[in-house]
Image (cartoon, grey):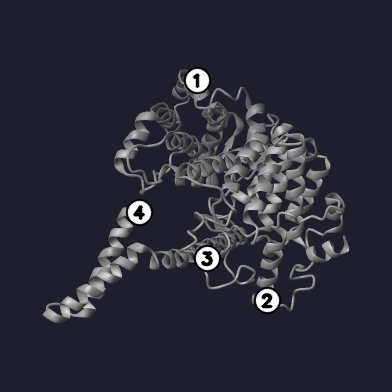
Amino acid sequence: MSDFLAQLSAAPSRGHGAANTTDSDYDRQLRDLLAYLKQPSLVPSTADLNEVLEALNPAIHSLSFLFLLRLQIHHTQKRTNRDIPDDLLPGYNLWKHAVRFLRSFDPIQIRYAGHEWRQLVELIASAAQFVSKPILAVKVIRDALERFDTSGIFTSIHQMFVKLALHSSSYADALPIVDKFLYQFPPDTEHGCTERLLCSVQASNEVFITDSSGFSGDLTYRDHLQFYLYSAMIYMAAKQWDRASHCLNIVVSSPTATSVSKIMVEAYKKWTLVNLLGHGKLHPTPSLIAPQVMRVYQSLARPYISLAEAFEKGDMRKLAAEINIGRAIWRADNNSGLVSQVFEAYDKFVIIKLGITFSALTMPDVLQRASLCLKGSHDVEEFVVSLVMSNALRASLSHSSSSENTTMLRFGPTTRTRGLREEYVRARLIQTKHALNTIARGVIQTDRALGISNENLQFIVKNQTWNGNSEKSGAVGSCEADGGDVGDIDEDLMGNAY
């Protein structure tokens, strides 16, 4: 038993005994340990797997802990003839071991065990759903994704995670994951980065997250659209309308070769409502949307466009009529909740727009210009107070000294104070910096992938052939051939991308 534990502990994490080991030596140690763990007769007959798991620290010996845990789960599944045995359910022994591991594993060691790591995450999700408590899996998977560097790369775990978050209404728990930029699928193994070893601290995540590393299951174009639609729905629940609109923009402006998918049409309908809720009007549609696609959207989402037109024109009666006429449509599209919020938001934007024309108004004056939803000056005063408290309206309220005790609404300046403006600009600059850094990494990785793609290699061969023919004939200089033709190819690539 002691010899067995010694073998399992042969390659500790970098922070616990392997800090001074070179990348090449550490890579060799981990691969030797991996080969040992994959032996059919790994566990001695005298060893108790549960006792071994208790003795191992998943933060230090992550590879060994993961393989033994998966082996214990497999034995339990085989013994009970069930994919989700009782011992894997929340609160039981295997669940506790799995949660302990996913919240403390060493990310560098797990780069060598993508399949096993993903299968454990999927088992945790299935076990939580089996007892109708998906929120338990959401918290664990969120912690696991934050420990592991998946930034920039979309995986099947992301797709599964947002579904669980929606089913469990765990919107706040999902935000740390959906807030991260994702700009590519796992790269092909042959096109992946190979300049560093898996265990190198400086290695980018596309070194170890590839199409064959196991960290992601098979992905399709539909999965990508669904992920951003689900992310938008999470932002809607959190009332982060700008972020929801951004996610929906990605879906509705996605390139399409033949027909518009149902997911894209659903996203366009929600995009219409989200713009009304966030800004009180429709934003211009993304310029990336082809005219024929836009015509399809407008045809299939006509009731939503009519609703938006009534909202923008400030026609409360027409808005109420459009909402009533389309009740069956909103219900069938699962958008009844958003439409009801649009109705409630009407007064909010009416009052906000009053600040453009007036500097101050009494509550009866505000009520006269608001909708029939507000029954009296007391109701409108409470409503205005809620807008001011939530920072949706820059204004103040004061009571008159007269016996009428009329409340006066005084609108604040349209420009921000200097301190607030500087803080706002600073926050936006930091956000933009992170976005640009992410885009820059994506451009470098895309350039690298294109540089070694079959298409580019074929082009280089053809270009060299053209150069050789040109030099023989003397018709075109080599510089002209290199410069002009490459520019034409780049333009074609950009054109075909959309």
Mark 2 or mark 4: which comes first in sequence? 2
Q: Nearer the viewer, mark 1 or mark 4?
A: 4
Q: How much space separates mark 2 and mark 3, taking CA atoms?
A: 32 Å
Mark 2–mark 3 CB contact (< 8 Å): no
- The N terminus is located in which quarter? bottom right
What residue sits right under mark 4 in the picture? 497
Task: Using the rendered view, name the quadrant where residue 406 is placed.
Answer: top right
Q: Residues within 10 Å of mark 1 (few under 14, many from 20)?
A: some
Q: In the picture shown, does residue 377 fall above or below 472?
A: above
What residue sits right under mark 2 in the picture? 25
Q: How much space separates mark 2 and mark 1, taking CA atoms?
A: 66 Å
What residue sits right under mark 3 in the picture? 437
Q: Nearer the viewer, mark 4 or mark 3?
A: 4
Considering the numbered disc 2 on the image, is that residue within a helix, a strand or a loop?
A: helix
Mark 4 or mark 3: which comes first in sequence? 3
Q: Amino acid at mark 1?
A: Arg
Please report the residue visible at 25 percent of the width from the left and 75 percent of the height from the top: 464
Please report the residue visible at 47 percent of the width from the left and 41 percent of the height from the top: 222
Mark 1 or mark 4: which comes first in sequence? 1
What residue sits right under mark 1 in the picture? 327
Q: Amino acid at mark 3?
A: Asn
Q: How much space separates mark 4 and mark 3, taking CA atoms?
A: 22 Å
* 300 or 91, nearer to the observer: 91
Q: How many marks?
A: 4
Q: Nearer the viewer, mark 2 or mark 3?
A: 2
Q: Amino acid at mark 4?
A: Ala
Residue 477 in the image, given as x and y percentages of width and height: 18, 80
Mark 1–mark 4 CB contact (< 8 Å): no
